[in-house]
Amino acid sequence: MRTMTCIEDLRRTARRRVPRQFFEYADGGSYAEETLHANRADLERIRLRQRILVNVAGRSTKTTILGEPVALPLALAPIGLCGMQHGDGEILSCRAAQEAGIPFCLSTMSICSIEDVAGAVAKPFWFQLYVMKDRGFVRGLIERAAAAKCSALVLTVDLQVLGQRHRDIKNGLTVPPEMRIRNIIEIATKPTWALSIARGKRRTFGNLAGHVRGMQDVSSLAQWTNGQFDASLSWKDVEWIAGLWPGKLILKGIVDVEDARIAAKTGAAALVVSNHGGRQLDGAPSSISALPAIADAVGSSLEILFDSGVRSGQDVMRAVALGARACLSGRAFVYGLGAGGQAGVTRAIEIIRNELDVTMALTGVNSVKEIDRSVLVN
Ligand SMILES: Cc1cc2nc3c(=O)[nH]c(=O)nc-3n(C[C@H](O)[C@H](O)[C@H](O)COP(=O)(O)O)c2cc1C
């Protein structure tokens, strides 16, 4: 892993190791991928201010997220099908995050279930909720997350309907993979991946299988899932969920100031400025371009987290400078997982942490709380 010096190295290795349908599921965005590309392009455009001869010998990347101490302003984002990038991917990623001193968020659409992960890691993790039409099932998920002592509930609010990803359709993405000739050939050429999946606990949606009445076999489970995203979701449902969840609530998927203002009145502890990594509304503004106005409008009422496009410590610096408390990492850690399992996720976090540390030094900053717009070139 030492020769993996940047997230792009992990990405290239993951592309070699993970079957195409799962690599492209992670790598791609919706429709023409305009927003996916804008997320990166707009981050790269932000220039950092080089400062010299400031004593930075005592600097630290430590901070807090929702009052909890963290080693750097970063958490691992919820990733559906994480366990298809590497067997037991959710457990391994959670362990890597906890060992590195940052939060991990488990997706509703994970392969390992809430209980699998809770039974295999040392500390509480966050749970991400998709609101399905079957509200009884949603209530059950919230109760399971509470029973597993999850430390925050991340309610994703930007997926009432699914943005189309062309590549997933062309690749015939299913969970577990359908045994078509092309897939069999793909899998046969990825032995490390195949072995990890064979040894993993599960090969389907762990939070759903066995919990959805009348849905036993995998194909009906997939059908159920596709029909379950709820287009009628509204702020009323957020109220309902806030009433059911006893802990901290985070609203994920906001890029509009008006929405952020409403979110700030729900009692949520944080919101995530996010366009789902360019996987939902194609044509939406880049997440980083939406951040400053949202931070200005509601940053004093709740914590502002940020994701979509973060691939380096420099990106974390940019987002924190523009008002984020911390960033969520999506693809950056997923590439690490595909490239090398738990060691790959550890490496991804380490790369970002080291880059942030050096970036702080070269911009003349000693602590995360000193990072503000003054570190940027206007
Ligand atoms: C493969 C993949 C699966 C994802 N699954 C979920 C999910 O199940 N729930 C969710 O809220 N967000 C999901 N997201 C969005 C991420 O949580 C996050 O918002 C996004 O990845 C951030 O952008 P980045 O990948 O550029 O860091 C997913 C993203 C990817 C790449």
Image (cartoon, grey):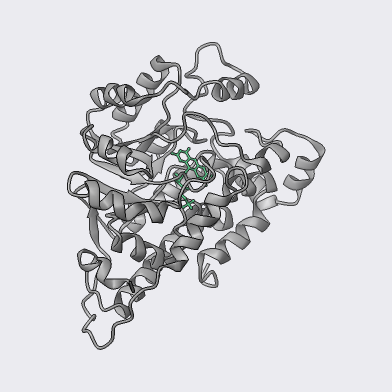
Horizontal side of residue 302 vs 272, given as left or right: left
- In this view, the residue in front, 198 or 156, is 156
Residue 302 percent location from the top left of the image = 21, 44
Residue 238 percent location from the top left of the image = 31, 27
User: Residue placed farthest to the bottom in the image?
Assistant: 53
Question: Is there any visible trace of residue 72 in the rendered image?
Answer: no
Residue 247 percent location from the top left of the image = 23, 33
Q: Quadrant of residue 360?
A: bottom left
Quadrant including the C terminus: bottom left
Location of residue 367 with respect to 248 vertically, above or below: below
User: Residue at 39% of width from left, 34% of height from top?
Assistant: 157
Location of residue 122 with respect to 229 vertically, above or below: below
Residue 299 percent location from the top left of the image = 22, 49
- In this view, the residue in front, 216 or 352, is 352
Location of residue 139 with respect to 299 vertically, above or below: above
The tally of labels here is 0
User: Residue at 32% of width from left, 31% of height from top?
Assistant: 148
Question: Is there any visible trace of residue 279 in the rendered image?
Answer: yes
- In this view, the residue in front, 117 or 335, is 335
